Amino acid sequence: MANCSEQIKIIAMEKRMPDWDRVLTTARGRGYFAFEFDGDIIDLITKIRALLDSPTKCLRILEIDGHGTPLSCNGLDLSTVPIWGQQLMTLAPLGCARGWCEPECSIYLSGCNTGLSHIPMDPNTSVAQQLAEAMRFNPATFNHHITVYGSKGYLSGTNMNGDEVTEREYSEGIWPFSTDHPAKKGASDATGSKCWLPYRNW
Amino acid sequence: MTTIKVRAYSGTPTITLDAGQSKLFRDELKRVRKFYPASKGLPAAKIGPDCVITIRTGRGTSEYQLFSRAVLVETRTKKKWQFYFGLLLMEWLYP
C-alpha cells in the first residue's frame, strides 16, 4: 500500500451560508482546508489538485457545505451528477494512492435532506446516492472505496465541526406568519453521526 | 397572454404549464396572497430551492422560488407563503 502520510480534509462552502465565518475560523484547528465554493466542479477539482501536490498526500474527506434538497447540494444536482462523478474520479492519477486515501474516503453533502429520496415511492433517488453510483468502484478503472453521506433531515452544522443536527420537519416564524417545511420520507431528528445516511460506491 | 415556466433550480428539467395548469396555479397563488399573511426572508436552514417559477404577463415578469415543495418565496421581495400547491408543481416537473 502507498505511503499516504498526509491525509487531506477539505470543506468547500457556499459563501452566503450563515455559519461561513465560524467554519473558516474552526477549519484550521480541525485539520481542514476550507474554501469558498460556488458550485463549479471544475474550480473545485483545480483547488483539490493544488492541495494534492506531493506523492504522500491523498484526499480523505471532502465536505460540500451549502443549501441542499433531495435533488441538489451547492451546484451538485441530478443533472450534474455524472459530471461531478467523472471529475472527482479524475483525482485518481494524482498524488498518493492515486488521489484518494485508502482504505476508504468520505464525501459529505452538508445540505438539507441530501440523503433522502425526492420520489417518495423510490428510496434510491437522493443526490448522495446518485453521486455514489456515479463513482462506482471498479478494480480496473476506479479502485477506490468512497462513501457519500447525505443528510436525513433539515440540517444545521457541519460534519467538520461535529455539531450537525437534523430535524425531521422545519418551521419558521410564529403563526399566522409561520411557514412549515414538511418532512421527507425517511427523515428523522438526529445529532452527530446519526444525521447521515451512507451510500457506498462498492 | 400569461406564460408560466417552472424549472429545476439547476436549470433542467423545465416545463411550461398548459392553460389548465396555469389557471390552477394562478388561482392558488391569488388565494394564498389574498388570505395568508406573508413573512419575509429566505429559509434560515440549509434548504436549497427546488425550482424557480417565472410568470410572464403583458405587464411584466415575476419570479418565485419553491422550497421544500411547500414554501413559496417571491424572489424580488423575499416575501414567503405556505404553498402546498408546490407538491403538485414538483409532480409536474418530475413526472
Image: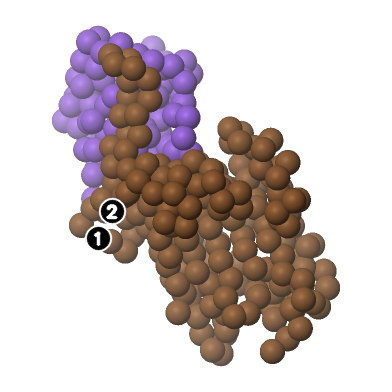
Chain colours: A brown, B purple
Position of A16 with respect to B15 (left or right) is right
Circle 2 is placed at which residue position?
Answer: A186
Seen from the viewer's position, the closer of residues B26 and A141 is A141
Q: Which mark is residue A122?
A: 1
Residue closer to the observer: A144 or B34: A144
In the displayed structure, does residue A103 sit left or right of residue A127?
A: right
- The answer to whether B16 appears left or right of B42 in the picture is left
What is the crowding at mark 2: few (fewer than 14 residues within 10 Å), some, or many (at least 20)? some
User: What separation in Å lies between label 1 and label 2 (alpha carbons)?
Assistant: 11 Å
Locate residue A125 relative to residue A11 in the image: left or right. Answer: left
Disc on res. B15: none
Who's the residue at 22% across and 31% down the image?
A: B85
Q: Amino acid at mark 2?
A: Gly
- Residue occupying the point 28% across, 37% down: A182
Quadrant of the frame with the N terminus of chain A: bottom right
> What residue is at 35 percent from the left and 34 percent from the top?
A170
Task: Give, as a three-letter code, the residue at label 1.
Answer: Asp
